[in-house]
């Protein structure tokens, strides 16, 4: 119970940073718009391959993989911009939308290879899940969780330390072992926060249907807008949290005065040493 309470405390501290830089909220919105544009741009190339999802050709797989990389690139680019902006704020700066995007643009040399690596891992895990039966789904799920935990700090690492992707993955893994051990309570807690914040969308839908067909349309529209807003906020809070966690892990500092060391110590219990 105390760890769940501490998660809300971490989310509150991240929210304090976001309130100081509301422009960061625009970045998840831009990421969503850019992702839709990229996905739509691949519809015609997929049509030209002559394959379908039921009967794909080798060229269809090539185009789909290219789309995976493009979508991963967009997501990582804007996540990098969020981390860049959050880092500026936590270091006492006053970031703007332009400075955050500029920070991401300066890291294109790391973003592209990380997008390729992320897309490749995602495709491999999906293939294992689809073709491995129940065992494959279990293996893919476990491997995906391990990968996400080990690489959680990759973006803050290559943004702040200015190192290559391979080195950033190794560094992220080392920081995970050093600081988190096997405790991922805070990440689960952030998911819980997002779920609770999204619940009012259900109320909008129920209330709308209770008012008739017109009310149902209005309720569904409000629910969609609410979920999009919650998704934007949680994406921004997650990037701020990643950046603050990196600073705590590497410097044991109080990032920007918004966070307290005790918050991280309660959220992430170091892995206990083996008993001889």
Image: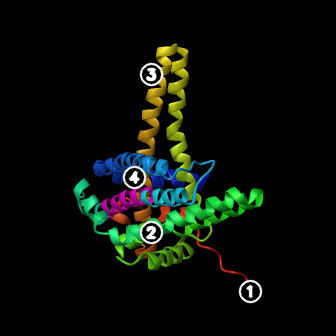
> What's the distance in space between the residues labelled 2 and 4, CA to CA?
20 Å
Above or below 211: residue 145:
below
Specify start and end residues of the magenta stretch as a single range: 71-87
Q: Are marks 2 and 3 in contact (CB under 8 Å)?
A: no
> What's the distance in space between the residues labelled 1 and 3, CA to CA?
64 Å
Above or below 211: residue 9:
below
Q: Earlier in the sequence, mark 1 or mark 3?
A: 3
Q: Earlier in the sequence, mark 1 or mark 2?
A: 2
Which residue is tagged 3? 218
Q: Earlier in the sequence, mark 2 or mark 3?
A: 2
Look at 51% across and 15% down and name the residue there. Answer: 213
Look at 62% across and 62% down and name the residue there. Answer: 125
Q: Residue furthest top?
A: 212
- Helix or strand or loop: what does disc 2 sit on? helix
Q: Foreground residue, 57 or 3?
A: 57
Look at 50% across and 53% down and name the residue there. Answer: 49
> What's the distance in space between the residues labelled 1 and 4, CA to CA?
43 Å
Q: Foreground residue, 218 or 124?
A: 124
> What's the distance in space between the residues labelled 2 and 3, CA to CA?
41 Å
Label 1 packing within 10 angstroms: few (<14), some (14-19), many (20+): few
> What's the distance in space between the residues labelled 1 and 2, CA to CA?
39 Å
The answer to whether residue 34 is left or right of residue 6 is left
Magenta stretch: dominant SS? helix
Name the spot of residue 62 as percent of width and height, x first.
51, 61
Which residue is tagged 2? 114
Which residue is tagged 1? 276
Residue 43, magenta (yes or no): no
Label 2 packing within 10 angstroms: few (<14), some (14-19), many (20+): many
Q: Earlier in the sequence, mark 4 or mark 3?
A: 3
Nearer to us of marks 1 and 2 is 2
Q: Are marks 1 and 3 in contact (CB under 8 Å)?
A: no
């Amino acid at each position: 119970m105390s760890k769940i309470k501490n998660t809300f405390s971490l989310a509150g501290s991240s929210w304090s940073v976001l309130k100081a830089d509301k422009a960061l909220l625009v970045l998840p919105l831009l990421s969503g718009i850019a992702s839709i544009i990229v996905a739509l741009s691949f519809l015609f190339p997929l049509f030209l391959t002559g394959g379908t999802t039921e009967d794909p050709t080798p060229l269809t797989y090539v185009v789909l993989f290219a789309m995976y990389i493009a979508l991963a690139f967009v997501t990582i680019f804007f996540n990098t911009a969020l981390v860049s902006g959050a880092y500026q704020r936590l270091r006492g700066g006053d970031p703007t939308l332009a400075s955050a995007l500029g920070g991401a643009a300066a890291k294109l040399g790391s973003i592209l290879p990380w997008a390729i690596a992320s897309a490749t891992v995602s495709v491999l895990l999906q293939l294992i899940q689809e073709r491995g039966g129940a065992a494959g789904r279990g293996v893919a799920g476990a491997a995906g969780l391990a990968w996400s935990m080990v690489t959680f700090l990759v973006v803050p690492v290559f943004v702040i330390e200015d190192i290559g992707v391979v080195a950033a993955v190794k560094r992220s893994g080392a920081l995970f072992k050093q600081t988190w051990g096997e405790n991922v309570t805070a990440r689960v807690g952030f998911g819980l926060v997002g779920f609770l914040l999204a619940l009012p969308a259900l109320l909008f839908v129920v209330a709308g249907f209770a008012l008739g067909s017109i009310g149902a349309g209005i309720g569904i529209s409000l629910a969609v807008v609410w979920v999009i807003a919650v998704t934007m906020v949680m994406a921004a809070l997650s990037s701020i949290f990643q950046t603050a966690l990196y600073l705590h892990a590497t410097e044991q500092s109080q990032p920007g005065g918004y966070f307290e060391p005790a918050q991280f110590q309660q959220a992430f219990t170091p892995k206990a040493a083996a008993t001889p």
